[in-house]
Amino acid sequence: MIRTLAPSLLFCIFLFAGCKCTIEVSGVVLDLYTNEPIGGAFVLGVAPGSIDFVTDSTGEFEFEELELDDCDAYNVKVQAQGYSEKTVAITNGSHIEIRLDTIF
């Protein structure tokens, strides 16, 4: 019985392990105290299928049709000159606000 199920089980594991998903996420990076947008902030993926984006002058970023290996939450690290680095989880279809604290 186990010998009969082994090929089917291996096929299912391979099928699901090789799946990719497409996510869409948007957000804005803001100063924690002034609520001013932070343009030029780096939004960097910290998991497989890495992403790299830079916010525009209004602090906005958007991932459209980003193909990832994992459809669950995806971690990004946000960095900007003069601010503490922050890691946050993003999920598909969300619009998030990321507030960075100054280092001075």
Image (tube, grey):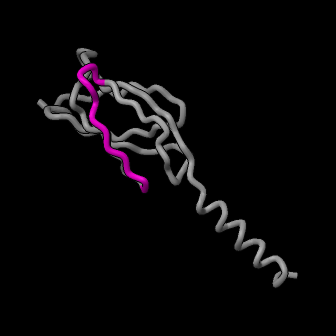
Q: To which quarter of the image does residue 84 belong?
A: top left
Residue furthest toward the right?
A: 1
Residue 57: x %, y % from top left: 23, 22
Identify the residue at horizontal 24%, vertical 16% (top origin): 36
Who's the residue at 35% across and 41% down the image?
87
Direction bottom: furthest residue: 3
Residue 52 lies in the magenta stretch: yes
The secondary structure that dominates the magenta segment is: loop
Please state the horizontal and vertical placement of residue 98, each as a whole percent of the image: 35, 28
Residue numbers of the magenta segment:
48-59
Residue at the far front: name it: 65
Q: Quadrant of the C terminus?
A: top left
- Which residue: 49% across, 39% down? 65
Q: Quadrant of residue 28?
A: top left
Q: Vertically, is 85 above or below 5? A: above
Task: Assign the N terminus to one quadrant of the image.
Answer: bottom right
Which of 88 and 55 lies nearest the eye of the viewer? 55
Locate residue 96, reporting x and y percent: 43, 27
Q: Nearer the viewer, residue 14 or 32?
A: 14
Residue 65 appears left or right of 103: right
The reply, left or right, for residue 13 in relation to residue 23 is right
Residue at 51% from the left image edge and 43% from the top image edge: 73
